[in-house]
Amino acid sequence: MEFRLLGTVSVETLTGPLPLGPAKRRSLLAALLLSANTPVSLGRLTECLWDDEPPSQARGVIQGHVSRLRALLAGADAEAYGVELATLGDAYVLRAPETLLDSQRFEELLMLAREQRGPADAVLMLKEALSLWQGPALSGAFAGPPLRVAAHSLEESRLATVEQLARAYGALGEHHRAAALLTAETAAHPLRESLAAELMLALFRAGRQSEALDRFHRTRRLLADELGIDPGHELADAYALILRGAPGPTGAAPPKSAEASPAAGPSPVAVPPGSGGSPGDGGPSRVAGIPSRSTEGPSPVAGDGADAAAPAPPRPPFQAAPPSPAGEPHPVDLLPRAPRGFHGRAAELAALSRSAAGEAPVCLVTGPAGVGKTALALQWAHRNPALFPDGRLFADLRGFSAAGEPALIDVLREFLLALGVSPRRVPESVPAAAALFRSLTARRRLLVVLDNARDSATVRTLLPGGAGCVTLVTSRHRLEGLIASDAARPVPLDTLETDDGTALLAGVLGEERVLAEPVAARRLSELCGGLPLALRVTAARLAGRPRWTLAALAGELADERGRLAYLDVDDTGVAAALRLTVQHLPPGAVHQLARLGHHPGGHYDPYTAAALAGTDPVTARAALERLAAAHLVTETAPGRWVLHDLVRLYARSLDPASAREALIGVLDHCIATALAAADTAEPGGEPCFVLPEDFRRPSAVQDFADRAEAMRWLATEREDLALTALAAREAGLDDRAWRIILLQWPQMVWRVRDSWSPLLELALESARAEKDAYAESRVLTLLGWVLTEEGRTAEAAALLERSPVLAREAGDPLGEATALVNLAVVQAELGELPIALEICARAIELARGEGDRHTEMLTLQHLARMHLTAHRPQEALDCARTALDLGPEHEEAARRSLLLAVCGEARLALGDEEDGVRLLDRAAQEAERAGYDEGAVRALEALLRVSSRTEFRRRHDEALRRLAEEN
């Protein structure tokens, strides 16, 4: 999948472009892509889609386009690419890896071009960047004001790149190619003076002086005729240089001023890094919604002055240094060799380049054990030797090594000796040695790589003193103290994407072996969790066993019980790396990590973590924060953490004996929290079971402020609750399994057509395993109703026949009443209306006998609907009114909406159209306020059968759209 903005706005897939439809939908997509991974407000989207006053239904139009886009992306398997179009309050966000956006790849290629040491390599990068353009930016979209600005900025960036490519051609002596490139662009942009100036110089260097001069005069006349202005300094300077027969250094742009002139001497880099646009402009223009990735040198600090005694200002960070004079000693270089088989990480390498562009920057590469932090740091350092003419220092601080950390004085001594200090002049104390190191580096341009740092204090002591020095730190900890005290710029490192992981395997095993089993290679990458260390160990195992197939090893790794063992070789492996991280943790954090490994779900909040560890949420949160700082857990949202699969397996191995205790703790936590959620979401409902005899109440249970918050928790935790229930079933804890599933009934009722059957069938197995008639009846009742709503009426009838009998056996009259109601609904669906009415009458008797208004109200609601189906509107109206009198105004919003709808339809059937419309409108409004979109659709559909009002149609379509987005 690929998103295109550089040309016609489109989404390319393996089967061709997606049919995006009208221009406004393309505009919406463009606006979301320009701010990819950032929420875009409804107001901003409205500005992008309409030039002037938007229509009153603008929100509905945008929601409709979002709904259609979401469906198109889902149909193209967007989730597999990491693409998601999400709703965040009153905004939308399109989450997508940057590699899928052509505009982001364009920027990355420009950054790489600036980092190239030779013009030939720069030409390749720039040509590839320009090849991404398929026409004018944002074509095919309706360009509201923000999109017009963005398109203009993108075009400015493209033209700046064309000029940069022409200068690179010039550095190679290929002036004819530069002239040909510039001629085409000048024809399209005749008033762009920088293009004309570049073309004049290219023509002159190609031996075409008369054409160069003619170009000047044509441009001069055009400027005068069209704009009434004279040529600017760029054109004038180029004209003067051509007349003198000396157009400046080959490949250089005409100088804007004496300070900016490249005529001071040739540079070994064809395209001075950082010059992304016209000469001296600091890079391509910022595109609206897309952060600029150009790099700029440090600005002079106000008040620095030009004191002769002050040190000379450092060269801009990305200007290559001139070669050392003859006889000058070679710059010191303590870097280890460049990593072999390095793959991917283009975004992180570019981020390091941006971070290193400031004054005396400290760049901080952080990530979990085995993710490739050292490899990234060394790759970047070896790519950029010209940036550091005074040398490169390296120290392994062994912050997570079994051998322990080196003494700081030893590290400083090695640095000072490398910088030429006599051994006898090296101070003996750390403060004195650090002061000498800062003094020696004050006027130098050095790279200092501090690998495997454990804490901020160690790094501070080793920071160089020069404004032109760059310090590159790697750590498994976040080192937030270093960020606060020294403005360290974090570059977090995550696991590799599947394609990059496969490429890493191919780099070790050879492409032929990987291409022979591409599916197995991708599976291996997935089983290694994208962790470079795990991938290298896997590759090492296969490299030493040429007869092994990739599929065979993938099969071995698929078994979680032995996966970590397979990912260890000699003294290197995932478990060994994780062990070194864990040994530096306090006991409480280690205990928490060990218990997290036994959680059957994928996510943790402080309540879940506390239940697993047998602590309280405050203690659990502190432990999770400590684990996150060590990159052993990842916070995916505020208060919500996840474990990498391999970390989870390692954590499980820390305390295997506690597995059952931890599982019971989290099961009882799920039951207690789901009970609280169900009670908040449906306060009128009767408890659906008693707690297990050995239930262990958690130290704290999450509170829910209102129904919306409770329903949101049930929706968010659905997958984890299902995994937890499955784990309970497999562990023989069936009394917990069916309870965890049954407690999700408010969500099942609310989103009944959302594939609940498999989960309820699991609950049925657990209830039957327990030989619990009460549980079996309750599960059958809910499952039968879900099957009815899914249109599987015959199956539902077979199950529901058994449910009331079981409820009577269990002495559960309210359960029997609910079962009878659902059975009556099925009988009505099958055309047995008289039988259905009799069953409802029995259910009402049971509910009244127990004094339960909630169940009576439910029964009357269905009875009213059956009377309406039987063309008995007066009886339907009487039943609905009786039910409404039972329920308090502030509760049962969904049920009240359904009853009001029955009243409205009954009034219509009795010939009172005005009152019928009023009641149906009221039913729809109550459903809309409660977020009950299915009820709103039902009421509005009934309204539309008797009314053609535009408002009803709009509300109906919006409710349908919301349903489509949520399901």
Image: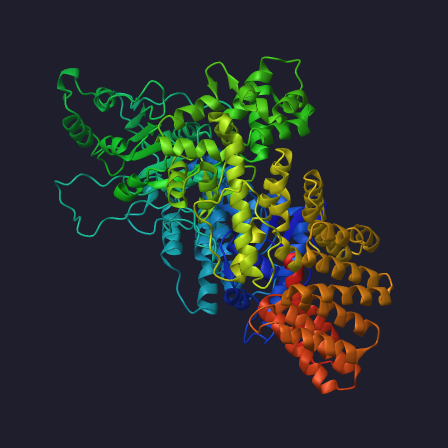
| Quadrant including the N terminus | top right
Apparent side of residue 579 relative to residue 748 in the rendered image (left or right): left
Write down the quadrant of residue 229 in the picture: bottom left
Relative to 385, is 19 above or below?
below
Apparent side of residue 526 relative to residue 337 in the rendered image (left or right): right
User: Which residue appears at 75% of the width and 52% of the height?
Assistant: 803
| Quadrant including the C terminus | bottom right
Residue 351 picture location, percent across and down: 42, 41
Q: Is residue 496 visible?
A: yes
Write down the quadrant of residue 245 in the picture: top left
User: Which residue appears at 69% of the width and 23% of the height?
Assistant: 516
Residue nearest the observer in this picture, 951 or 278: 951
Relative to 416, is 318 above or below?
below
Apparent side of residue 660 relative to residue 454 in the rendered image (left or right): right
Way the structure is coloured: rainbow
Number of numbered discs overlaid on the protein picture: 0
Q: Is residue 944 visible?
A: no
Relative to 635, is 369 above or below?
above
Residue 100 picture location, percent across and down: 58, 45
Residue 161 picture location, percent across and down: 48, 47
Residue nearest the observer in this picture, 215 or 937: 937
Relative to 711, is 637 above or below?
above
Residue 543 picture location, percent across and down: 58, 16
